[in-house]
């Protein structure tokens, strides 16, 4: 006799899972503010700002554990400055993002060749999808 069951449900309800990265230390649930990496060839531990992505060979640490960090005897600890305050996007960042979205949404004309693309008069140089623009005041 075969018993059919519905899809498996998670043991933790999704509304309780936090998108904030937590400290890698056991039993520490505080939010991470710094990332620790090791350079084994130089016997160096590097503690810097929280990495953009969680990496498998890096450790995210809360402020308390990052302040108390020590390295093995003979190792050097390099502490890169970390700004633990919230990083807010500037007006330039938001404008650049909006322009990138507009450009990506603009339909490409397949009949145009690569050499006949319209060039922005403010554009100084281009590298891949990135552009260097001249200031409008100059």
Image: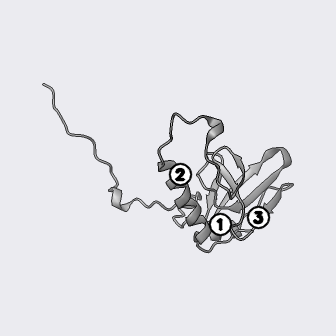
* Residue 107: image location, x then y, percent: 47, 44
Q: Where is residue 85 in the image (x, y as percent from the top left)?
A: 62, 74
- Does residue 32 appear in the picture of this structure? no
Please identify the quarter of the rendering in which residue 6 is found.
Answer: top left
Q: What's the CA distance linking mark 3 and mark 1?
A: 15 Å
Q: Which mark sits nearer the N-terminus, 3 or 1?
A: 1
Q: In which quarter of the image is residue 137?
A: bottom right
Position of residue 80 measured from the top left corner of the image (x, y, whole percent): 76, 64
Closer to viewer: mark 2 or mark 3 = 2
| Label 2 vs label 1, nearer the camera | 2
Residue at position x 70%, y 48% in the image: 126
Q: Name the residue under label 2.
A: 103
Which labelled disc corresponds to residue 65? 1
Q: Is residue 1 left or right of residue 12?
A: left
Q: Nearer the viewer, residue 73 or 122?
A: 122
Please state which of residues 94 and 28 is positioned toward the viewer in this rendering.
94
The quarter of the rendered structure image containing the N terminus is top left
Which mark is drawn over residue 99? none
Q: Distance between the residues labelled 2 and 3?
A: 36 Å
Residue nearest the viewer, comparing 137 with 69: 137
Q: Is residue 10 above or below residue 95?
A: above
Is 26 above or below relative to 63? above
Please rate how many residues cluster around mark 2, counting C-alpha atoms within 10 Å: few if below 14, some from 14 to 19, many from 20: few
Q: Mark 3 points at which residue?
A: 80
Residue farthest toward the bottom in the current orientation of the protein: 85
Q: Who comes first in sequence, dot 2 or dot 3? A: 3
| Horizontal and vertical percent position of residue 45 | 77, 55
Q: Residue at x 27, y 42 (%)?
A: 8
Q: The C terminus appears in which quarter of the rendering?
A: bottom right
């Amino acid at each position: 006799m075969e018993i059919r069951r519905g899809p498996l449900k998670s043991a933790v309800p999704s509304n309780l899972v936090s998108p904030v990265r937590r400290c890698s230390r056991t039993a520490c649930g505080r939010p991470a503010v710094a990332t620790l990496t090791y350079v084994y060839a130089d016997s160096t531990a590097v503690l810097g700002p929280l990495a953009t992505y969680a990496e498998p060979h890096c450790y995210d640490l809360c402020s308390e554990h990052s302040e108390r960090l020590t390295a093995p005897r003979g190792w050097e600890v390099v502490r890169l400055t970390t700004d633990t305050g919230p990083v807010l996007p500037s007006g330039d960042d938001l404008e650049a993002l909006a322009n990138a979205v507009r450009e990506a949404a603009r339909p490409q004309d397949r009949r145009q060749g690569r050499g006949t693309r319209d060039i922005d008069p403010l554009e100084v140089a281009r590298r891949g999808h990135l552009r260097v623009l001249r200031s409008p005041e100059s």
